[in-house]
Amino acid sequence: MHRRSRSSLLLAELVISIFFFLAAAAVSVRIFAAAREKSDEAVKNQNLAALVSNCGESFSAAEGDPEKTLSGLQTVYSGLAVQGQEGTLSLSDCLAADAGGSTTLSITFSETLKGTGTLHSMTLSVTSPDGTQAYSRVVEHFRTGEEGS
Amino acid sequence: MKKREIHFGASGISLILVLFGIVAMLLLAVLSLSAAQASLRLSQRVLSSEESYADAVSKEAEVLAGLDAALSSGEAANTAAANAGFSAKGDGTYGIAIPCGKTQVLAVTVKIEGTTVSAVTEKTQSTEEVTYDTSLPVLKKSAE
């Protein structure tokens, strides 16, 4: 009788332990998943910040020249495909959170004559796998007529 | 002589150990979440700062283009500079502070020669008083 009550106590303890452990494990997994999601988002932001900085610096250093800008960027992003005055980069390696791999960055250039000089514009646009524009930024550089000549 | 049996499981120690494990696991998960949250906040600030700088540089280009257009249309240097938001400095140069984020400005100095405008200096400046904590040895060293 005494032995039976003791073994049932042991069984009850085992069941309670397993129950609590499973409940806590489920909660922990959810918390870890949320942390992973935030961490991925942070990496994506950092890479995007580096991208904006690199493109902006390269554009300013090249004084708005599309070819020089793209050439400079190719030293940083080896996967950058250049066609004419447009650059395209698959961001699967660059933005860690985009595991899909079809997120692309396209860099386009335009110029407007202003006064004696030219206002050069570079547009960075990140397109999501579903085709929507996820991010866009315009960087401008003014080159006076004397600088250009 | 009667031998005394020890039932380790029934004494409740295993349950206590499992509970301790659960608490440790939850604590690690919460710490991980907290670290990821802090990292996300920092990355958002870095991105925002880069975007602000890019916007300020673009604004500078637009201001210079406007000034150049005004000068080439025959407007006087002082009037054109004032209309573009520049303030005259003593040494014949003109300066403008373009907002760059919440706590910084992009200070640009230009020189006007005839109808040509050229940027002389360009630097970011803090608009807030910054008091550094020099009690940290790393800052002390850099201050020296």
Image: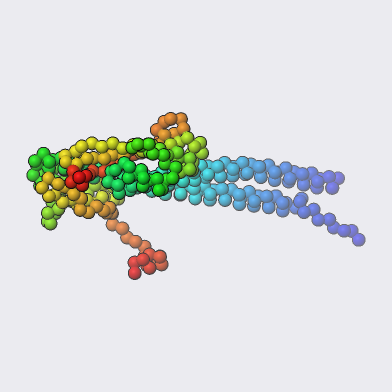
Residue A14 image point, x, y percent = 73, 45
Camera-nearest residue between B124 and A125: A125
The answer to whether residue B11 is left or right of residue B82 is: right
Kindly identify the residue that appears in the image at 85 percent across and 58 percent down: B4
Report the quarter where the C terminus of chain A lies: top left
Image position of B97 with respect to A87: above or below: below
Q: Quadrant of the N terminus of chain A?
A: top right
Q: How is the image coloured?
A: rainbow
Tell me residue A66's x, y (percent).
31, 41
Q: Hey, which residue is sitting farthest right in the picture? A: B1
Of B140 and A122, nearer the camera is A122
Specify the farthest residue to the top: A131
What is the x, y in percent for residue A58?
33, 47
Residue at (19% x, 41% y) in the render: A117
Horizontal side of A38 relative to B18 (left or right) equals left
Q: Residue at x 57, y 41 (%)?
A: A30
Residue A133 or residue A80, whichever sits in front:
A80
Can residue B6 be seen in the rendering of this structure? yes
Determine which quarter of the picture holds residue B65: top left
Residue A49 seen anywhere in this rendered image of the structure: no
Most foreground residue, A124 or B83: A124
- The residue located at (28%, 57%) in the rendering is B129
Total numbered labels placed on residues in the image: 0
Q: Where does residue B16 sit, x and y in percent of width and height? A: 68, 52
Position of A23 relative to B109 (above/below): above
**Apparent side of residue A147 relative to residue B19 in the rendered image (left or right):** left
